[in-house]
Image (cartoon, rainbow, N blue to C red):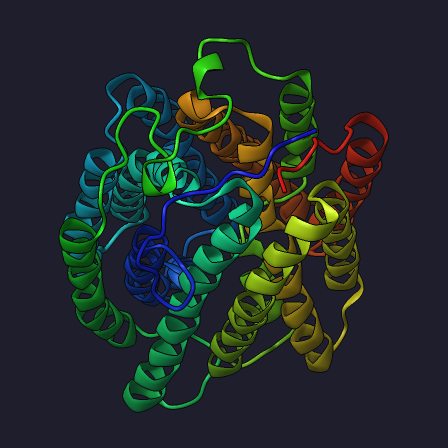
Amino acid sequence: MVEEVKAPAQKRIFGFSPNVFFLGIASLLTDISSEMIFTLVPLFLSNVLGVATTIVGLVGGLSDSTDAVFRIFSGWFSDKIGKRKLLAVVGYSLSTVIKPFMYLATSWGAVLAIRFGDRVGKGIRSSPRDALLASSVLPHERGKGFGFHRAMDTTGATLGLILAAIIIYLVQGGGLELSRESYQWLVLVGIIPAVLGVIVLLVFVREKRGEEGLGGTPIPGASTAKRGFDIRFKIFLAILAIFTLGRSSDFFVILRAQNLDVPLIQVTLMLVLMNATYAVTSLPMGMLSDRLGRRRLIALGWFIYALVYLGFALATSLWWAWVLFALYGIYQGVVEGVGRAFIADLVPEGRRGTAYGLYQGVTGLMLLPASLIAGWFWEVLNPSAPFYFGAGLAFLAMVGILALIKEPRRPR
């Protein structure tokens, strides 16, 4: 019988520990910035710089894969030194410093270099931040904690895209293509929330030292930190790799919308809708996973993803794109926070930094071949081909997680 883990009374903010709340605020501010500056990079490359789709795939895949190695290393290093906040601050700060250079970018090589620097920062911060968050919630509230964080993160993305849509409309009005002037304004405004996010992290988030959990409570299993990883964790990583091979950069989702002759302002609003549905579903899905288990919800999310990619492959008109972007947000809301909570269920506290590094590292490393394959399919076959490929691998991953992984016992 698993005993209930109790912690001394601690001040809470809207039902969450201060660390969880302020990590959420920092992510909200950072994502406002990132969505304004980087989400429309494929259109900047294609419309402003005039590069080929294969180059767009290279920039998207390489930038998304860059942080993978750094996530693995920073997660392991945070376990070793026991300082999660320090690495999170370094990562957020690096990304903030590099963003203004997008204002000056005039070649795809410059865009790649700047995006590389931003993703290095993301790689340094992500695993330690997730490990810090996992140590800041009780085991039976992990889904709720990670669901809240993903909801805040995605609310920031939604607000960033709304601001982007307003700026684009004010600068260039309608039209299918992005202008350089619009993009430069996005960069100038987007820098401000990035700086505020770093300040929130520095001032309000508290380091959790050693094997200390919420309210000073020892984390169950922390004494087993040097033990090998659970076989279920290893199988999950292998299945995740298969899924991610078909999950090319979201650059291709944006390009597919433009391929359907969707006006630029509507593409931006579709991204707003996607992030809004992501934000709305993240917290309830996280809380549901605390009650029903994580494995089935992850499988459900991958099934939704398969349907969405099949839809993008078959889409022929604008209204399809609106529906598919909304469903794509639901998939992310179901999977993203729940997946992170699932890692915390499978791995003891003392190894969670490394585990999150491996989890996010596998995802990042597979995005490069996934995006190169997608770009090749797009150019050589047709724009639907990458989405058929992604749908097939998502369905295979869904079957794999249901057949090969058992749900871990959940603390009550």
Is 58 left or right of 324, judged from the image as shown? Answer: left
Residue 246 position in % (x across, y down): 68, 40
Report the residue at 74% width, 33% height from top. 407
Residue 400 position in % (x across, y down): 81, 31
Q: Could you tell me if residue 47 is visible in this image?
A: no
Task: Work out which quarter of the rendered image holds the C terminus and state it.
Answer: top right
Q: Nearer the viewer, residue 42 or 10?
A: 10
Report the residue at 79% width, 40% height from top. 398
Report the residue at 29% width, 43% height from top. 109
Residue 84 position in % (x across, y down): 27, 33
Is 138 left or right of 113, judged from the image as shown? Answer: right
Q: Nearer the viewer, residue 145 or 124?
A: 145
Q: Residue furthest top?
A: 227
Residue 151 position in % (x across, y down): 48, 63
Quadrant assignment, res 332: bottom right
Q: Is residue 217 above or below residue 203?
A: above
Task: Work out which quarter of the rendered image holds the N terminus and state it.
Answer: top right
Q: Nearer the viewer, residue 327 or 299?
A: 299
Q: Could you tell me if residue 407 is visible in this image?
A: yes
Q: Is residue 153 above or below residue 341?
A: below
Q: Is residue 273 above or below residue 405?
A: below
Quadrant assignment, res 402: top right
